[in-house]
Each structure stands twice: as structure tokens, then as C-alpha cells.
Image (spheres, grey):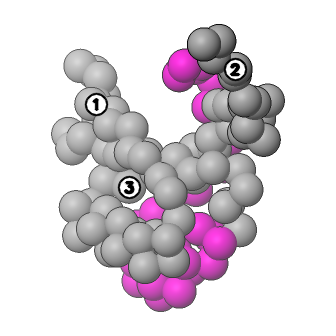
Amino acid sequence: MAKTVVESKFSKGKVNNEIELCRVNDKSVKIAIERALLGERISYFIKWEKPGFFSSEKKDSCIFCVNEWQIEAAEKAISDLGDEMESKIKYIMKRIDKTLF
């Protein structure tokens, strides 16, 4: 019995289309962003960055990365958090350089 391979519509889709959305140093802001993105059902992942040896920053920072198709919804979800939270967020908005898969 021969097996046939059925191509799905996703098999030819583009991979690695994530955008670095923003950088956060404050844990309470990180949690608020996570809740906002999850509340809007936006897929994301977090990249952690440790400060360099000679860096003036002493805290770890995290970068929220989202799919390029969800960038507008993610920006709206974060802007809905308010000006106090948004003042602690640094927007990056650049494509991820590394190939993940």
C-alpha cells in the first residue's frame, strides 16, 4: 500500500516572519504586555537579553517578538495599556536577523 503525501496550504508558506516588537526591562510591564497579547489571542515569543559586562544597565531585558501579520493588533493591544505603561516600553519594530528553523 503506497502512501501519498498531501501538500497542505501551509507547506509553501513563509517561515521566520517574526518582528521584534518591543524591549521591556520592568517585570510588571512584561506581565501586563503578556496579558494584553494573550487577551487578544496574539501569538508571541520572548527573547531574553542579559546586560553586557560593561553595560550601564543591570537588569535583564526581554524582547517581545510577534508575527508580521499580527503587528498592528499587537501595537493596539499594547497602546491600550495606557501612557504610564507605554513610557516604560521601547519599540524596536525590526525583522529578526537569525534563522530559527
Q: Does 97 appear in magenta?
A: yes
Mark 2 to mark 3: distance in Å? 48 Å
Looking at the rendered structure, the kind of residue marked 2 is Thr
Q: Residue at x 62, y 78 (%)?
A: 76
User: Going from the N terminus, do you reach mark 1 or mark 3 first?
Assistant: 3
Q: Which residue is denoted by mark 2 in the rendering?
A: 4
Picture quarter containing residue 59? Answer: top left
Front-most of 54 and 74? 74
The secondary structure type at the circle numbered 2 is: loop
Q: In the drawing, what numbered circle is on residue 51? A: 1
Mark 1 to mark 2: distance in Å? 51 Å
Which residue range is magenta in the image?
A: 73-101
Eyeballing the image, is 20 above or below 39?
A: above
Front-most of 74 and 13? 13
In this rendering, which labeled residue sits more in front, label 1 or label 3? 3
Q: Does 83 appear in magenta?
A: yes
Q: Residue at x 32, y 44 (%)?
A: 61
Q: Which residue is denoted by mark 3 in the rendering?
A: 24
Eyeballing the image, is 31 above or below 79?
A: above
Front-most of 91 and 75? 75
User: Going from the N terminus, do you reach mark 2 or mark 3 first?
Assistant: 2
Q: Residue at x 51, y 77 (%)?
A: 40
Q: Residue at x 65, y 31 (%)?
A: 16
In this rendering, which labeled residue sits more in front, label 1 or label 2? 2
Asked whether disc 1 touches disc 3, contact meaning CB atoms under 8 Å apart, the reply is no
Rendering coords of residue 92 (x, y %): 60, 48
Asked if residue 1 lies left or right of residue 81, the reply is: right
The secondary structure type at the circle numbered 3 is: strand
